[in-house]
């Protein structure tokens, strides 16, 4: 019996180490292969191959699987695209993206608490909108509009699917439409903050929509919590904080070094 327990523990340790190694390989490899190939294709293929279980189902379950894994896919695809648009040479941003994706895979993604789910969604919003804004800077506004809708829909669904409310289709569509509208309005004056020669570029739109996503989720949770007794004062603090923060960003930080 003791030998069986020892062997089981050894297998568990071995499988854990293999799991960590494979996730590190994906987190570092997706960025590394994108820089070395100077193309996002191989990096995107690597990310999608890592999600093979999503596609290895019967056709009637495929759409549901895709919806359930949208946040994870958005994070992986965004990391690859941000790496590609940073340029063909190694910059500090590449190492930042390696660390971010590795931490996502090893620590953040496996979490399942309510707060962790919100954090996962906010990360997907920030990275997804950052990649979408940079990628679609010279393209038709419809591109950033559609991508913003997808990110907003995925982030909202990821949070709401963890709750007891199973009728969240309307809420996710509303969140996606608001994301799309804000992205469309901001496209004609897209602001990107740069940080010297590090290669780090942060779109103003990504910050604004991340703040909005937080406030939107807080407001909806409060409405569910208080139901018929809901009052605006229950969400006054977060709403004021979001409005003031976005106002400061728009009014005082709209003169960046790099403007598209």
Image (cartoon, rainbow, N blue to C red):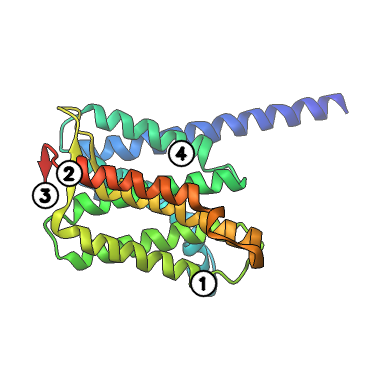
Q: Residue at x 44, y 51 (%)?
A: 239
Q: Position of residue 18 (x, y in %)?
A: 54, 33
Q: Tag 3, which secondary structure? A: loop
Q: Nearer the viewer, mark 3 or mark 2?
A: 2
Tell me if I can see residue 161 in this picture.
Answer: no
In the rendered image, which quarter contains the N terminus? top right
Q: Position of residue 135 (x, y in %)?
A: 20, 52
Along the polypeptide, which appears first: circle 2 or circle 1?
Answer: 1
Distance Cα–Cα, label 2 vs label 4: 30 Å
Along the polypeptide, which appears first: circle 1 or circle 3?
Answer: 1
Q: Position of residue 191 (x, y in %)?
A: 17, 47
Tell me if I can see residue 57 in this picture.
Answer: yes
Closer to the camera, 168 or 249?
Answer: 249
- Which class describes the residues within 10 Å of circle 1: few (<14), some (14-19), or many (20+)? few
**Residue to which mark 3 is pinned:** 260
Distance Cα–Cα, label 4 vs label 3: 29 Å
Q: Are marks 1 and 3 in contact (CB under 8 Å)?
A: no
**Residue to which mark 1 is pinned:** 169
Closer to the camera, 109 or 177?
Answer: 177
For residue 167, side relative to residue 127 (left or right)? right
Question: Which of the labelled discs sits on residue 254, or is there none?
Answer: 2
């Amino acid at each position: 019996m003791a030998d069986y327990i020892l062997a089981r523990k050894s297998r568990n340790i071995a499988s854990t180490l293999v799991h960590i190694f494979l996730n590190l390989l994906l987190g570092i490899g997706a960025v590394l292969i994108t820089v070395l190939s100077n193309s996002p294709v191989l990096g995107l293929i690597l990310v999608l191959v890592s999600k093979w279980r999503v596609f290895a189902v019967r056709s009637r379950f495929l759409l549901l699987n895709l919806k359930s894994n949208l946040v994870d896919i958005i994070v992986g695809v965004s990391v690859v695209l941000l790496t590609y648009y940073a340029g063909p040479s190694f910059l500090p941003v590449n190492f930042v993206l390696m660390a971010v994706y590795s931490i996502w895979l090893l620590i953040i993604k496996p979490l399942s608490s309510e707060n962790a789910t919100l954090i996962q969604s906010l990360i997907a919003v920030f990275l997804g909108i950052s990649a979408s804004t940079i990628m679609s800077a010279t393209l038709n506004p419809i591109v950033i509009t559609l991508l913003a809708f997808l990110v907003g829909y995925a982030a909202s669904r990821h949070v709401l699917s963890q709750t007891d409310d199973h009728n969240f289709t309307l809420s996710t569509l509303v969140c996606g439409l608001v994301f799309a509208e804000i992205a469309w309005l901001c496209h004609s004056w897209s602001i990107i903050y740069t940080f010297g020669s590090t290669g780090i570029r942060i779109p103003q739109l990504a910050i604004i929509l991340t703040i909005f996503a937080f406030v939107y989720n807080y407001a909806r949770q409060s409405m569910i919590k208080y139901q018929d007794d809901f009052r605006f004062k229950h969400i006054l603090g977060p709403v004021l904080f979001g409005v003031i923060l976005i106002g400061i960003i728009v009014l005082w930080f709209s003169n960046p070094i790099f403007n598209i």
